[in-house]
Amino acid sequence: MARLKPKNSIKSKEQAEAAMARLNQIDTQLAGWDLDEAEDIALVREGHVNAQNKAGRQGIETEKALLVKEIESWAMEAQASWEKKTLETPFGRMGFRLGTPAVVLIKRVARSFKDACELLAKTLPVFVRNSPEIDKDAILAADRDKTLDVGKLNKCGLMVDQEEQFWVETNASKDLDEAAKKLKCA
């Protein structure tokens, strides 16, 4: 979308109300289009779901999962006779590959990652992160409670800032927001 520069032509409350009326008309039109689109998409998806259910999609997906498990079971036994980790067939390939390494919990040693972290801190502290961070929520809470020492906070290079922002909401913008949510779900 191109950058828009306001003309600054609104000089009175009446002109602002007229502009709001036009904004409301625009939002009504946009909401109507978006709602129509969401309804059409939902109908098409519903049609596809019904057709796939009638054609037995769930049974086919179950059969596929079972076949994959059976092939995997066979491959685990037969892998030793393969020349490579991958077996080529006329219909595709199968094989074994290493997954992404992961740090996992040995539950008989540590019940949770918190417990494991405490044990690691004692035996291998080089692998424990110590990352201090600013507790912004606490600063904002102290500011709200009027207990914040603003001078000391400023000396640390921080301040609490709250800007006033302009907003506009037409009566139709609620419909537009609802239409946008339906489109995201469609």
Image: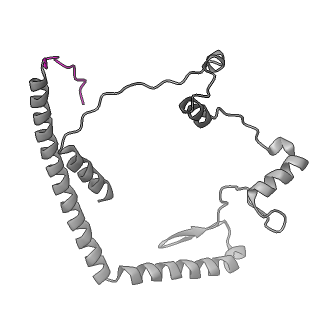
* Depth order, front residue of 21/2: 21
- Residue 84 picture location, percent across and down: 67, 66
Classify 35 as above or below 24. Answer: below
Residue 171, x across and y down, in percent: 18, 44
Which residue appears at 79% of the width and 64% of the height? 106
Q: What residue occupies the far right of the structure in this picture?
A: 123
What residue span does the magenta drawing correspond to? 1-11
In the image, taking residue 125 as reference, residue 130 lies left or right, namely left
Residue 10 vs 118, above or below: the answer is: above
Q: Is residue 160 above or below residue 63?
A: above
The residue depicted at 89 percent of the width and 48 percent of the height is 122
Question: Of 45 and 95, which appears nearest the observer?
Answer: 45
- Main SS, magenta region, reads loop
**What is the quadrant of the N terminus in the image?**
top left
- Place of residue 26 in the rendered image (x, y in percent of width and height, measured from the top left): 13, 39
Q: Quadrant of residue 20?
A: top left
| Residue 7 figure quarter | top left
Left or right of residue 148, residue 185 in this image: left
Of the 4 image quadrants, the one containing the C terminus is: bottom left
Residue 120 visible in the shown view: yes
